[in-house]
Image (tube, rainbow, N blue to C red):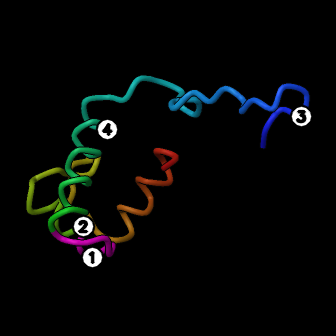
Amino acid sequence: MTDTATGAWPYLDVHQSRTHEPTPYEYRLAATLEEIFTEEGHELADVARGLNARNVGTPDGTQWTEETFRAEMNRLGA
């Protein structure tokens, strides 16, 4: 939606919903997810299998499941 007075688009900050700088864990998780999406697929089973195969554990160090992945994405606000 443009500003009706100026016709300009409102300013958008690409990180406007961030509450903090990503942690090393969050950076590693994001990079690994990108790799999995490119190489293996987008289904939750593919994601859990890919994270486990790359030894990227959950925050508590357990293996990923579809349920733990959903819960973590919810926690991270993704």
Q: Residues within 10 Å of mark 2 (few under 14, many from 20)?
A: many
Which of the 4 quarters of the picture holds residue 41?
bottom left
Instruction: Tell me if label 2 and label 3 are in contact, CB under 8 Å.
Output: no
Side of 59 relative to 71 (left or right): left
Kindly identify the amino acid type of the residue bearing the numbered disc 3: Thr
Q: Sequence-wise, which precedes: disc 1 or disc 3?
A: 3
Give the residue at mark 1. 45
Give the residue at mark 4. 26
> Which residues are the magenta region?
40-46
Q: Residues within 10 Å of mark 3 (few under 14, many from 20)?
A: few
Give the residue at mark 3. 4
Give the residue at mark 2. 48
Side of 20 relative to 37 (left or right): right
Q: Report the residue at 22% width, 40% height from top.
A: 28
Q: Sequence-wise, which precedes: disc 3 or disc 4?
A: 3
| Cα–Cα gap, marks 1 and 3 | 46 Å
Side of 23 relative to 13 (left or right): left
